[in-house]
């Protein structure tokens, strides 16, 4: 019976043979400003790219354009995101077996803009030459994907002749990924999935609190541990104001599957001030008051305006880890003309009639004709002519074309990461071989890093129309950094169990166990793992805590000095006993004087009383009152001596049983009495210490 079924399938395959046709645009293109574009991706003119999202029901598409595709992203099946120059007008679409499609963007109503995207759908005619292919899969609930597209295998699947990528998946089973060759004789495939068990895995990040995704689904918040099916997963880790991580991970059955990541901040700081106080400041059309703000790296467009003042416009470049200061002072309107300059790059200089005005964005000029020249190192100069009249407002746009050369930077360890800086601003980040044709001219610095190897740093220059070759050789080991230790003679410091003497020396960077030991009292003052690197302050100053920090508080409130020194239980006992006894003493003496007044009143009544019966009653009452006063007087004295005794014991305890701690601080080299943040056996806090 199975052979007959197979023959029927083959016969059906032959009957359904068809041919292929051409590509075409489906529907009307849409403006899609909601698609977020990476503004760090620049074209050959170092301009922010525009985006074109291609939506399709086909696979294996390829693209080209007149100015060239700057970058192509295809994270999801059926979606291609093209980064193009804003001036691009033609995009071509290619697919094997189809006639190429040439899209004239203006004819489709598409006008590209920097930083925003359009969406257009591309499809193909019904494809001929399709072969019905049957799949027999156990379990039948499994998911089948052919060329990254889901297929229903309950009936024959129509496929073109040739090689196809097949993926079969189902929870609790080991997936199958393989390439299959489809033709009229090979159109039946039978596969059985093997059961698997859950495997543990954990995700940790520094800092914690990042959201992580497996595929398109959020899985948890770091640090977390879970169980899931073994296999390959696309991991995405995201945290606000940090660079996201996208990585392919493999979760195995017989492995701990621990994954750890260090997240880098993806922010720069804008320090903003302006006047007059009531001005309106817009940054990318969002209102900002004066102050400091953390912003994602990129180019921002600023505009500041106020009634009866001249509006200013500016372009602000925010670099990762860089603090940018901006102070704007608006001028009042005058009998002049205004020329606003929109300049790229923003650091270009301006000359007016051969007079250098520096890096300005607005010119206030008397009426007349002016030649405005914009220049920048590494760019070709541009000149415009402007005719100024009283009250005129003009806007001139300058897009300087960069002078470029070619760069090839190779590293003997392809997995190493290279960061290139221009000044203090990061401009490129690569892994492995760097080969860039249109590289802006100028002087650059590079830094190549890889775990287990020394960081390599250097400089290179790019000249116009010239090729620059740079080769980086990584050497095993860690970076050497300065490590300093100062303190009294009885203090020892150990790094990973090795003792270091006082002074400064070069050591290898990395996380090290730092131990500070007091040889006189035979105790550790500090024992923690700390990073030792060229980006840290590796200076340790051991200072003794001042005795005044213990004695003076205890003179004021008994027990306070013991608490500050870390002996909080005795401190709590002394404080509670002293305050309790003192309060009871004050209450008792108040009560004693009140009873004394009552006793004197009864004596006065007894001296003037003439009735024998009342005299007898008053005598008995006076005797009882006198006994009560005697008892209260004795209690007051006992409480006074008790309070004084607690105070004296507190001072004796401070002098003989409470020792001065040492403050272990990583700080500037200062001598004498100072208030330092430190970690001591008493905990974290501010310690009053004196330097050695």
Image (cartoon, helix red, strand yellow):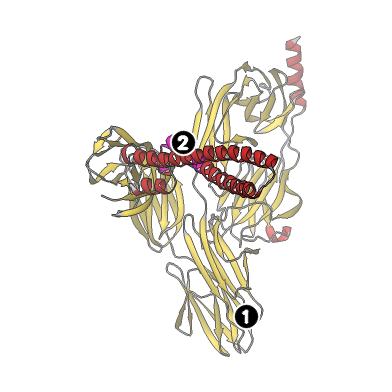
User: Which badge, 1 or 2, comes first in the chain's sequence?
Assistant: 1
Badge 2 is on which residue?
573
Q: Is residue 502 left or right of residue 247?
A: left
Q: Is residue 414 at least partly visible in the picture?
A: no
**Residue occupying the far top of the picture:** 1
Q: Is residue 646 at least partly visible in the picture?
A: yes
| Labels 1, 2: front one | 2
Disc 1 on helix, strand or loop? Answer: loop
Above or below, comparing residue 565 to residue 228 in the picture: below
What residue range appears in magenta? 563-582
Residue 16 in magenta stretch: no
Above or below, comparing residue 659 to residue 365 in the picture: above
Q: Quadrant of the N terminus?
A: top right
Q: Crowding at label 2, few (<14), some or many (≥20) Cα neighbours within 10 Å?
A: some
Above or below, comparing residue 71 to residue 273 in the picture: above
Which quadrant of the view contains residue 282?
bottom right
Instruction: Using the image, tell me which numbered label, if any, was put on residue 309.
Output: 1
Q: Position of residue 292 (x, y in %)?
A: 54, 61
Q: Position of residue 650 (x, y in %)?
A: 39, 40
Q: Position of residue 69 (x, y in %)?
A: 57, 53
Q: Is residue 74 left or right of residue 568?
A: right
Disc 2 on helix, strand or loop? Answer: helix
Between 220 and 359, the one nearer to me in the picture: 220
Residue in view at x 73 percent, y 37 percent: 127
């Amino acid at each position: 019976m199975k052979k007959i079924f197979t023959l029927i399938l083959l016969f059906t395959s032959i009957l359904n043979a068809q041919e292929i046709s051409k590509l075409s645009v489906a529907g009307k293109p849409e403006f899609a400003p909601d698609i977020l574009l990476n503004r760090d991706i620049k074209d050959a003119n170092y301009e922010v790219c525009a985006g074109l999202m291609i939506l399709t029901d086909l696979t294996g598409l390829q693209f080209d354009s007149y100015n060239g595709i700057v970058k192509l992203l295809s994270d999801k099946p059926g979606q291609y995101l093209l980064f193009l120059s804003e001036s691009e007008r033609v995009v071509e679409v290619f697919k094997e077996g189809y006639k190429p499609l040439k899209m004239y963007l203006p004819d489709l109503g598409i006008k590209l803009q920097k930083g925003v995207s359009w969406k257009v759908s591309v499809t193909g005619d019904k494809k001929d030459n399709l072969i019905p292919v049957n799949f027999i899969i156990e379990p039948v609930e499994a998911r089948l994907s052919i060329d990254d597209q889901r297929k229903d295998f309950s009936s024959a699947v129509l496929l073109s002749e040739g090689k196809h990528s097949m993926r079969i998946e189902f929870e609790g089973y080991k997936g199958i990924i393989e390439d299959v060759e489809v033709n009229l004789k090979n159109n039946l495939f039978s596969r059985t999935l093997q059961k698997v068990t859950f495997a543990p895995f954990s995700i940790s990040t520094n800092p914690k609190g990042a959201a992580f995704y497996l595929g398109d689904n959020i899985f948890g918040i770091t640090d977390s541990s879970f169980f899931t099916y073994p296999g390959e997963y696309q991991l995405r880790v995201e945290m606000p104001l940090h660079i996201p991580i996208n990585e392919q991970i493999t979760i195995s059955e017989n492995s701990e599957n621990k994954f750890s990541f260090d997240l880098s901040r993806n922010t720069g700081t804008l320090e903003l001030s302006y006047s007059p106080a009531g001005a309106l400041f817009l940054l990318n059309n969002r209102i900002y008051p004066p102050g400091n703000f953390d912003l994602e790296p990129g180019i921002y467009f600023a505009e500041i305006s106020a009634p009866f003042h001249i509006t200013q416009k500016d372009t602000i470049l925010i670099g990762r880890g860089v603090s940018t200061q901006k102070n704007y002072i608006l001028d009042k309107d005058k009998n002049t003309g205004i020329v606003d300059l929109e300049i790229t790059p923003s650091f270009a200089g301006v000359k007016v009639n051969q007079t250098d005005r520096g890096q300005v964005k607005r010119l206030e000029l008397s009426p007349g004709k002016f030649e405005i020249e914009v220049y920048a190192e590494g760019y070709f100069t541009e000149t415009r002519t402007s005719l100024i009249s009283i009250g005129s407002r003009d806007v001139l746009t300058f897009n300087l074309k960069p002078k470029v050369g070619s760069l090839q930077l190779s590293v003997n360890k392809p997995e190493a990461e290279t960061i290139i800086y221009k000044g203090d601003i990061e401009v490129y980040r690569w892994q492995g071989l760097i080969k860039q044709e249109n590289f802006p001219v100028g002087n650059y610095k590079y830094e190549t890093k890889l775990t287990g190897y020394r960081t390599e740093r250097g400089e290179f220059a790019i000249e116009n129309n010239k090729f620059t070759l740079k080769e980086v050789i990584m050497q095993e080991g860690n970076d050497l950094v300065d490590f300093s230790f100062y303190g009294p003679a009885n203090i020892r410091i150990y790094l990973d169990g090795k003792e270091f003497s006082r002074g400064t020396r070069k050591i290898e960077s990395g996380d090290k166990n730092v131990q500070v030991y007091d040889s006189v009292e035979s105790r550790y003052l500090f024992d923690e793992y700390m990073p030792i690197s060229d980006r840290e302050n590796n200076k340790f100053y051991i200072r003794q805590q001042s005795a005044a920090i213990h004695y003076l508080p205890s003179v004021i409130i008994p027990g306070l000095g013991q608490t500050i020194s870390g002996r909080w239980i005795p401190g709590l006992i002394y404080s509670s006993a002293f305050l309790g006894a003192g309060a009871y003493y004050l209450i008792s003496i108040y009560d004693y004087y009140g009873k004394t007044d009552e006793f004197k009143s009864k004596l006065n009544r007894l001296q003037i009383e003439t009735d024998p019966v009342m005299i007898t009653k008053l005598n008995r009452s006076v005797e009882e009152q006198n006994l009560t006063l005697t008892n209260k007087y004795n209690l007051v004295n006992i409480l006074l001596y008790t309070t004084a005794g607690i105070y004296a014991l507190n001072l004796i305890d401070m002098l003989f049983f409470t020792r001065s701690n040492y403050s272990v601080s990583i700080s500037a080299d200062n001598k004498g009495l100072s208030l330092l943040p430190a970690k001591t056996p008493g905990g974290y806090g501010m310690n009053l210490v004196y330097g050695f």
